[in-house]
Image: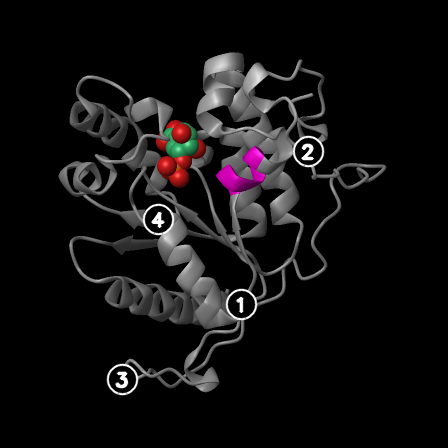
Amino acid sequence: MLAQDCGKFLPMPRQCIGRPIPFQRAAPAETGRPRHPQLGKVIDFMAIAPTTQTRTDDDLPRISRPVVLVGLMGAGKSCIGRKLAESLSLPFMDSDSEVEEAAGCEVRDIFEVYGEPAFRDCERRVIQRLLQGGPAVIATGGGAFMDPETREEVKAHAISMWLRAEPEVLHQRTKRSRHRPLLAKDDPLQVLKDLAAQRYPVYAEADIIIDTGNEGLEKTLQKAIDALRSGAARDTTS
Ligand code: S3P
């Protein structure tokens, strides 16, 4: 089975046999999806901006909805996401890892054995589940926000943050990785350019946009925290 999470039966590929499928899908609500209890509540605004890299609890925005990171492969969603979650004392989740855990095999095997549509279907269901889990930082796979249903769910239940970077920067960061099926092509830079042209107008619908170039991780992290703080301020006035 690809995953109970995916709600449909698929035979297990050879690569996955013998690997556990530890994920148990939560029972679905009787009518529609269960809504997060915090949904619709405002985010508290911490008024004092930090002046140094040393953050205290008072410097941090209090988050009452999941923060969903979107962006192309290599944008730093998992890396920044993990640090952001740590800083905000929130759980961190990565949709690709959750899909892999549910399926018992790697994303590239799902692509190869079942095809991209099966992966997208599983990804959509996994993200819907993660969004119901309360405040957390969720790194999504690069294509997740392109799915209209996922995008609507994220807009309704979460704060979305696009980590934006130039394709050339993304290429530098991803060129040694072997686990991304979409980049296993002759000209991965061109793939990234094409995906950027197609996806950036959609990623731009995110609540927050953070530019990440070759600056250090700490700088991007600080920008993300600052943006959440001022985003929280906007939220309290709406
Ligand atoms: C994809 C991005 C990957 C993974 C899959 C497809 C995409 O995640 O979900 O290979 O469509 O851009 P990362 O963005 O974390 O590499």
Name which residue type carries label 4. Trp
Disc 3 designates what residue? 52
Task: Decide: is 115 above or below 221.
Answer: above
How far is disc 2 from disc 3 in space, using C-alphas?
44 Å
x then y, percent, for residue 123: 55, 32
Q: Give the range drawn in magenta.
A: 95-100
Mark 2 and mark 4 lie on one chain; the one further toward the N terminus is 2
Disc 2 designates what residue? 21
Name which residue type carries label 2. Ile
Say which residue appears at 43% left-offset and 37% top-offset.
141
186 and 155: which is toward the camera: 186
Of all residues shown, which one is farthest toward the front?
18
Dot 3: what SS? loop
Disc 1 designates what residue? 63
Say which residue appears at 67% left-offset and 62% top-offset.
38
Disc 4 designates what residue? 162
Task: Decide: is 97 above or below 113.
Answer: below
Determine which of the numbered discs, if any, sits on residue 203 in the image.
none
Left or right: where does residue 227 sit relative to residue 120? Answer: left
Tag in front: 1 or 2: 2
Dot 4: what SS? strand
* Snapshot quadrant of residue 84: bottom left
How far is disc 4 from disc 3 in space, using C-alphas?
24 Å
Tag in front: 3 or 1: 3
